[in-house]
């Protein structure tokens, strides 16, 4: 995905450079002679409003895509203006549909494995934002707009009430049906082992081999 996105970005950069050259000569079309492509570049509106602010829906969706593709790295907080965008995404149907698309592919993969039924087939689930959702916590902390606070997050974890991600839970049940054993893996410390085990049970994950903590 990163390689593909990088190619797309490179292509856009190439087009914009060629566009700039054409504009300098008063042209309104971009000719890529070597590729036999000719198309109009107008109307073209990249910015909106006084001061050249980028269109909110475009900039926030682009930021999200770049983060997911790991083209933006080491980011600390969500841009302030994107709080509403991410909130609508996470609380709306698209987040659920995205989860469904991923878990359906995972199940297809599992079904095509050559399982021999020797009890050695293991599926490893991560905890946070994979098996358990911390969305109730982030909904009260700006959906990532606020800087991460380990103390308040650990207080949330210690409540042991995080719900399961619905599509992940469906995948979990299907994998058990295939005879695959489940292991949970987390970066949480050993001091949170017991509450995490309790939370998994509350969320419906009652059958698994072990929980591996940091």
Image (tube, rainbow, N blue to C red):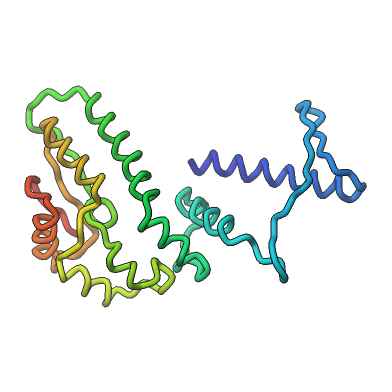
Quadrant where the C terminus is found in the figure: bottom left
Residue placed furthest toward the right = 25
- Tally the marks: 0
Q: Is residue 15 above or below residue 71?
A: above
- Specify whether 148 is left or right of 124: right
Q: Position of residue 46 (x, y in %)?
A: 70, 55
Front position in the image: 181 or 168: 168
- Specify whether 106 is left or right of 52: left
Q: Position of residue 26 (x, y in %)?
A: 91, 48
Front position in the image: 138 or 84: 84
Front position in the image: 214 or 45: 45
Residue placed furthest toward the bottom = 151
Q: Where is residue 168 in the image (x, y as percent from the top left)?
A: 24, 45
Give the residue displayed 54% in from the left and 39% down from the top: 4
Give the residue displayed 77% in from the left and 48% down from the top: 43
Picture quadrant of residue 53: bottom right
Q: Is residue 151 above or below residue 157?
A: below
Q: In this view, does 54 lie above or below 28?
A: below
Picture quadrant of residue 194: bottom left
Q: Is residue 100 above or below residue 35?
A: below
- Specify whether 162 is left or right of 41: left
Picture quadrant of residue 150: bottom left
Front position in the image: 193 or 83: 83
Give the residue displayed 12% in from the left and 33% down from the top: 177
Q: Position of residue 127 (x, y in %)?
A: 22, 54
Give the residue displayed 78% in from the left and 46% down from the top: 42
């Amino acid at each position: 995905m990163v390689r593909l996105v990088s190619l797309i970005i490179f292509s856009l950069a190439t087009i914009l450079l060629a566009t700039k050259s054409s504009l300098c000569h008063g042209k309104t079309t971009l000719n890529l002679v070597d590729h036999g492509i000719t198309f109009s570049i107008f109307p073209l509106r990249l910015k909106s409003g006084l001061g050249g602010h980028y269109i909110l829906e475009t900039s926030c969706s682009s930021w999200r895509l770049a983060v997911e593709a790991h083209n933006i790295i080491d980011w600390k907080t969500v841009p302030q203006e994107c709080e509403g965008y991410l909130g609508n995404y996470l609380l709306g149907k698209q987040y659920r549909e995205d989860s469904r698309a991923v878990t359906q592919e995972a199940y297809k993969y599992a079904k095509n494995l050559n399982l021999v039924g020797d009890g050695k087939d293991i599926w490893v689930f991560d905890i946070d934002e994979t098996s358990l959702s911390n969305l109730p916590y982030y909904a009260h902390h700006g959906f990532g707009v606020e800087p991460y606070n380990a103390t308040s997050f650990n207080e949330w974890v210690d409540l042991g009430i995080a719900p399961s991600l619905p599509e992940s839970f469906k995948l979990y049940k299907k994998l058990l049906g295939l005879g695959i054993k489940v292991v949970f893996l987390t970066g949480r410390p050993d001091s949170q082992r017991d509450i995490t085990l309790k939370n998994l049970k509350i969320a419906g994950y009652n059958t698994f081999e072990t929980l591996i903590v940091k």
